[in-house]
Amino acid sequence: MAVHYTREQVLARLRAEIDAGRPVVIVGAGTGISAKFAERGGADLIGVYNSGKYRMDGHGSLAGLMPYGDANQIVIDLGARTVLPVVKETPVIGGICGSDPTREMRTYLAELQRLGIAGVMNFPTVGLIDWDSKYRQELESTGMGYDQEIEALKIAKELGLFTMGYAFRPEEGAMVGAAGMDVVIAHMGLTRGGSIGSTISKEEDLAQAAKLVDAIGDAARAENPDIMVFCHGGAIAYPPDTAYMYEHTQAVGFLGASSAERIPVEEPLRAATAAFKAASLRR
């Protein structure tokens, strides 16, 4: 079973990695075997959230934004029965739908804490919906917007949980920083690569992504100089992409979901099956 960590203990672990010149790596886990081997590979944090379930069921990660299931209940089920039982020492982070109007968020967060989840981040998030769209603006104006996600993260911090905030624009980076979160994750959109990765970000330029990562990081650190800046998604899909980010931005960490547990297994699994099928029967 996973160790129960305090916010301070998680922060100390991550700061030690950064001080040693090593990036912080968060791996999203939609299965127990993903969590088990991400830990063996040295993951600093393991993330449990609804898109992991859909992703490892063979669907696109954005299924996590659709009404296919109770996002917050999936974290409890996937975390308590699948991931936490096989993780030995790595802190586990839950992705919460902070704008969920059907949950008393303080009670819910306390339950995650009781189960052994050490921290939370805002996923699923309305931040993935274009700010200029009517849909996003109507969500914001009817009490189901990004500001509600920030309020949920504030409650988590009050309870002593480690907190990370996804941000998609500098304005959201500033909100994450002002809320006193431990990490801002600059989100570049759906990850490219593999069988169900983003085709829109397929040709995106890493240099442009780096500019947005820094713009979000600058906005967050203007409000909270101690906040750590991580990156995720879009054109940042493979290890060389993250190396580019560490070289050209202030990012000190990366959250990999499709990058870590989906893309690396697709081709080896296909190839292994094909190799078994290539054998011949004795005639």
Image (spheres, helix red, strand yellow):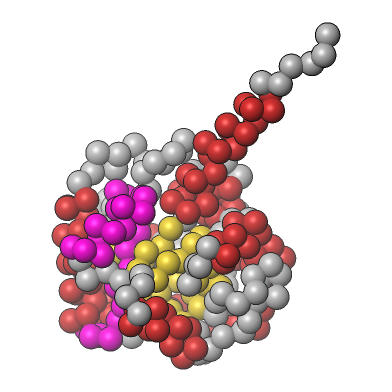
Give above or below for 276 relative to 51.
above
**Residue at image x 43%, y 51%?**
259
Q: Residue furthest front?
A: 282
Q: Is residue 250 left or right of residue 260?
A: left
Q: Which quarter of the rendering shows the C terminus?
A: top right
* Residue placed most toward the observer, 206 or 136: 206
Q: Residue furthest top?
A: 283
The quadrant holding residue 186 is bottom left
Residue 241: tell me if it is visible.
yes
x and y percent of residue 248 in the render?
18, 63
* Residue placed most toward the observer, 245 or 133: 245
Residue 228 is covered by the magenta coloring = yes
Give above or below for 47 relative to 158.
above
**Residue at image x 29%, y 43%?**
201
**Residue at image x 22%, y 55%?**
209
* Residue placed most toward the observer, 91 or 129: 91
Q: How many marks?
A: 0
* Residue placed most toward the observer, 178 or 233: 233
x and y percent of residue 219 in the render?
19, 74
Q: Which quarter of the rendering shows the N terminus?
A: bottom right
The quadrant holding residue 221 is bottom left
Give above or below for 221 relative to 190.
below
Magenta span of residues = 223-248
**Residue at image x 36%, y 72%?**
22
Residue 174: tell me if it is visible.
no
x and y percent of residue 48 in the render?
56, 64
Q: Is residue 170 left or right of residue 17?
A: left
Q: Is residue 34 left or right of residue 246?
A: right
x and y percent of residue 116 in the render?
63, 80
